Amino acid sequence: MNFKINPLIACILPFFTLFSCTQNKKTEEVKKPNIIIVYIDDLGYGDVGFQGAKGVSTPNIDALAKNGLVFTDGHCSASTCTPSRYSLLTGSYAFRNNAAILPGDAPLLIDTNKTTMPAMLQKAGYKTAVIGKWHLGLGNGYIDWNKTISPGPNELGFDYSFLVPATLDRVPCVFVENHHVVNLDPKDPIKVDYNKDLGAYPNGLEEPQLLKFGADKQHSNTIINGISRIGFMSGGKSALWKDEDMAKVLMGKVNNFLSENKENPFFLYFSFTDIHVPRAPNEMFKDKSTMGSRGDDIAQMDWSVGELMKALKSKGLDKNTLIIFTSDNGPVLNDGYDDKAEELVGDHKPGGPLKGGKYSIYEAGTRVPTVVYWPEKVKPGTSEALVNQVDLFASLAKLTGQKLAPKDAPDSFDVLDALLGKSKTGRDVMLEEGFTLALRDNNWKFIAPQSKPTPNWLKNKNIASGLQETPQLFDLKSDISETKNLAATNKQKADEMAAILNKIKTQKGSRLGYSE
């Protein structure tokens, strides 16, 4: 049987075919998952309800965990903040760039020629944003806070940035939005100096009666909002932040970004300032815990997570948004301010069953709360897979169909199947960074010896640092609290892991093992 096609239909058929293909392509683009990394500051393994917190409730985070995949062996890459953030965004171990905790006026730590996670996601069609704490440096070595501040996150792949430039305990106490200080009066220019008092604001050592709470000598320079900070500044009065409003300000910017990009696939790096010192939560969270301001700060953090989930749901974004909830390092109680965190901790164990905390090479330094939530793809449950934030780069590249160049993300491995709950295994071997290096080999942990003495400031934190002149080896399967050093009785395993660690140190990148 022969069919004849109407000439008019023959003319318009190609158009409908093209239109159909275009629509299908557009539908596929819309189906790309939105990605949000919820990055808490100084949150310990045991600081959340679903992992045994006492004295404070975290119902919103617990709901995220109940409906997501909880990793009991999830890690940041280092036990301090700048190195972890560097590794997260670059897929590279921080020691390769000598990354350490940066001062408030440090230049940009990440080379703008380096491929970053947000830049990779931009190529995949994502709108990208960082909102919150930055602490990876800005500018090229000298920052004029009254002019365009560059380079920064916008030169590293972020379409939008709203930053706390360094930390809450460092000047300048202002927000930077896309290269410029927010609400700055040009008639009141900002100056910052970390070596000499500029005399514009009260000094914490000279006028302690003006403080809401006391601080150690390091944190007793410029007083802003009744809290003394590290470093000195002058000017910028109209631009100063108020600590108690921080969570609401950041959440407002998040809400705006979600509204503006609800039709596009987006990547949001939501970097909290909670629960880093100085802890000055909003009045609405006062006495929400039994642990003073640190516990109240945890309650404020949980509120922000709840507000984020409400915003996603109200915009119809909750089903197809991949949320990774985690922390930049482990917990610390006494960190420069007299906020009674040690005295009021009670039965609460910030690190849970783990030893150490922030600054420590023991497990509590890098093993942190880790939840992956994605209703359309991830089934609720618990995973014992060994995963590390340094691997998010390669894993998200796989998820979004991006191919990594050989030198991109040199220490990032694709563990996407583990993150999505499709595999029970993640990493076999993984580096941990503190003031020395450690290596995980499945449940074995080796800590490299450190010849330098533990600094007094670290001793005063009442945290087991893990710094010893002799090697340490632990079997975490039977000794999660790292109490029995097996390096002498199992010298063969210790030597084997020391050799692996030294090999990683000499390579330019562990993912491909290149060592030029």
Image: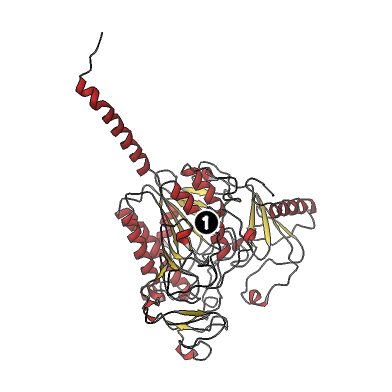
- Please provide percent x and percent y for residue 280: 44, 76
| Depth check, front residue: 430 or 95 | 95
Extreme residue in the top direction: 1
Q: Within the image, what quadrant is residue 451 found in?
A: bottom right
- The residue located at (60%, 61%) in the rendering is 78
**Quarter in which the N terminus is drawn:** top left
| Depth check, front residue: 205 or 154 | 154
Look at mark 1 in the image and give the residue it sits on.
Answer: 89
Q: Number of callouts in the render? A: 1
Callout 1 secondary element: helix
Q: Is residue 31 above or below residue 307?
A: above
288 left or right, relative to 446: left
Please state which amino acid type lies under the numbered disc 1: Leu
- Please provide percent x and percent y for residue 174: 42, 74
Q: Is residue 419 above or below residue 61?
A: above
Residue 286 showing in the rendered view? no
Q: Is residue 261 above or below residue 296?
A: above
160 left or right, relative to 420: left
- Please provide percent x and percent y for residue 16: 26, 30
24 left or right, relative to 465: left
Residue 194 showing in the rendered view? yes
- The residue located at (34%, 65%) in the rendering is 252
